[in-house]
């Protein structure tokens, strides 16, 4: 993790995010849950655990799996985060920050990506099985 501090906001401005140590790399998730959540692949950056929100009374959290939850603004519906339950790590949609200095370097759940789109960037690509083997907490 590079450690750049970034701030951002949801569409309506009711929720503001401050991420103390964001990564400069961006990733794409093609899993069916992310595509259902946002209508397409989810473009994110790793923000670690040092993330705070102003307006958190406007945040609704959805328990999306045994290991993670997703947050969104209750007013405008903006997707705010995907958070791992075990360690509190935040993965945040790029659009919240408005920055264009990210480098797209990885795609996950590539085995669930529909055939009708392809990113031209050369990236590391991982299947769902590879993602779980690398990042899933031990049982």
Image: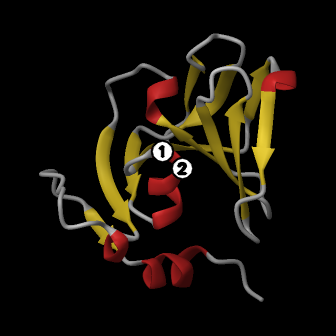
| Left or right for 88, reference 109 | right
Query: Real-space Cα distance between discs 2 and 1?
Result: 4 Å
Say what secondary structure mark 2 lies in. helix
The residue sitting at the bottom extreme is 139
Question: What residue would you read off at disc 2?
Answer: 37
Identify the residue at the far right of this view: 57
Bin the neighbour count of mark 2 within 10 Å (Cα to Cα): few under 14, some 14-19, many 20 and up.
Answer: few
Residue depicted at x 53% and y 85%: 133
Vertical order, 16 against 87 (above or below): above
Asked whether residue 17 is in view, the answer is yes
Would you say the residues marked 2 and 1 are in contact, meaning their CB atoms lie under 8 Å apart?
Answer: yes
Label drawn at residue 62: none
Q: Residue 38 carries which label?
A: 1
As displayed, is residue 41 above or below residue 54?
below
Q: Which residue is drawn at 71% across and 20% down?
A: 75
Residue in view at x 39 percent, y 21 percent: 99
Q: Is residue 121 left or right of residue 31?
A: left
**Res. 1 in view:** no
Q: Dot 1: few (<14), some (14–19), or many (≥20) neighbours within 10 Å?
A: few
């Amino acid at each position: 993790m590079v450690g750049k501090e970034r701030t951002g906001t949801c569409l309506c401005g009711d929720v503001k995010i401050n991420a103390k140590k964001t990564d400069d790399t961006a990733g794409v998730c093609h899993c069916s849950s992310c595509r259902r959540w946002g209508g397409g692949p989810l473009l994110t950056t790793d923000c670690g655990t040092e993330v705070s929100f102003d307006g958190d009374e406007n945040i609704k959290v959805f328990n999306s799996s045994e290991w993670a939850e997703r947050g969104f603004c209750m007013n405008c519906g903006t997707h705010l985060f995907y958070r791992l339950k075990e360690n509190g790590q935040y993965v945040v949609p790029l659009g919240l920050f408005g920055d264009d200095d990210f480098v797209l370097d990885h795609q996950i759940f590539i085995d669930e990506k529909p055939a009708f789109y392809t990113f031209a960037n050369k990236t590391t690509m991982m299947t769902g099985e590879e993602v779980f083997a690398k990042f899933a907490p031990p049982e």
